[in-house]
Amino acid sequence: MNKETKGMLIGGIGIFIFALTVAITKIAVETFSPSFIVYGRGALGGTVALIYLLIRREPIPAVKHFKFIFIVGLMVIYAYPMLMTTGMTFGSSSHAAVILGLMPLLTAVVGSLRTKEKPSLGFWVVAVLGSMVVIIYSLVTGAGEFSRLDILLLFAAISAAIGYTEGALLSAVMDPKVVISWVLVAFLPVSYIGTMTSFQIDYLQANHLAWLCFSYLGLFSMYIGFFFWYEGLRIGGIARVSQVQLIQPFIILLSSSLFLGDSLTMINLVFASLVISTVILSRKMMIKRQK
């Protein structure tokens, strides 16, 4: 098995964990505010990460690495979760599935700008086609104009792409598990303060399902999923392995149907398939990884 294939398989586990986040967030926002979910998942994941680092007796990262930690933290702990969670308060997860289908191409673009990976011209042509498909979908489903949900999800996807790339770069010199652990721990004070200020007393009366969803977001979406995702990107390369996110729209659509009872409309399936087709096509385009 070559490195690219191994990286895609490992990264695929992470993407499966992340893909369930949309439907689970949709359930969570019925009980908790977006702010509490975002800060709370960071606090929960960060607490577990702190315990992990203490048990492993991991040394504090070098000063030069903190710029990566800062950027990753802003993007994956706060920007992406807040934008996506806010969107889920008034939008459907099936709609989000198609817009977030742009993430593989965005991650590849950011990765190529930040690394020595050089995708071919064909890769970029397909990237533009994929973007056009997403834009058309947004216009068709938004009565000829972009909705607030589309804008939120687009910036969420961009935030995730930046966070994924910077985290993958740091994972080239550090254990991916240690990378995400230090990212969460570095922002733990902010997460704790945000959690306390956004907490409402009636949350104590929330049902078990709401707290189960919250726990998943904190432990898996915010922490464990990155073990696999950053490891996959490290092994197989950012541009190539980022394309494994092509499975994400389908998982989001299926999980939304299963957990939320969302109907799988023909337009959702058609556009999700078109987006995924462009990403599959990009998989066939050459990417040169310079040493």
Image (tube, grey):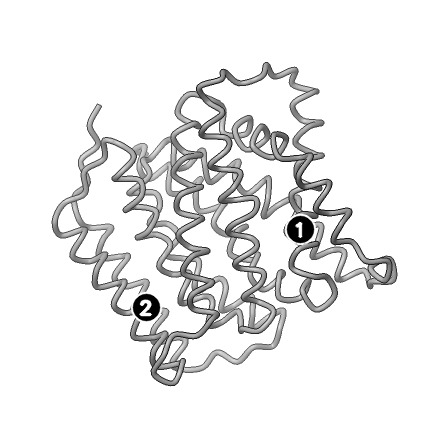
Image coordinates for residue 263, horizontal then vertical, percent:
53, 80
In the rendered structure, which amino acid carries the disc numbered 1? Tyr
- Horizontal side of 284 relative to 63 (left or right) equals left
Residue, disc 1: 216
Dots 1 and 2: beta carbons under 8 Å? no
Residue sitting at x 74%, y 55%? 212
Residue 126 sits above or below residue 220 on the image:
below
- Horizontal side of 181 relative to 4 (left or right) equals right
Disc with the residue nearer the chain's start (1 vs 2): 2
In the rendered structure, which amino acid carries the disc numbered 2? Val
Image coordinates for residue 252, horizontal then vertical, percent:
50, 64
Quarter of the rendering occupied by the N terminus: top left
- Cα distance between the residues tagged 1 and 2: 29 Å
Of 156 and 282, nearer the camera is 156
**Foreground: disc 1 or disc 2:** 2
Quarter of the rendering occupied by the C terminus: top left
**Residues packed near mark 2 inside 10 Å, few (<14), some (14 to 19) or many (20 plus):** many
Image coordinates for residue 159, horizontal then vertical, percent:
44, 49
Which residue occupies the extreme left position in the image?
Answer: 121
Residue, disc 2: 134
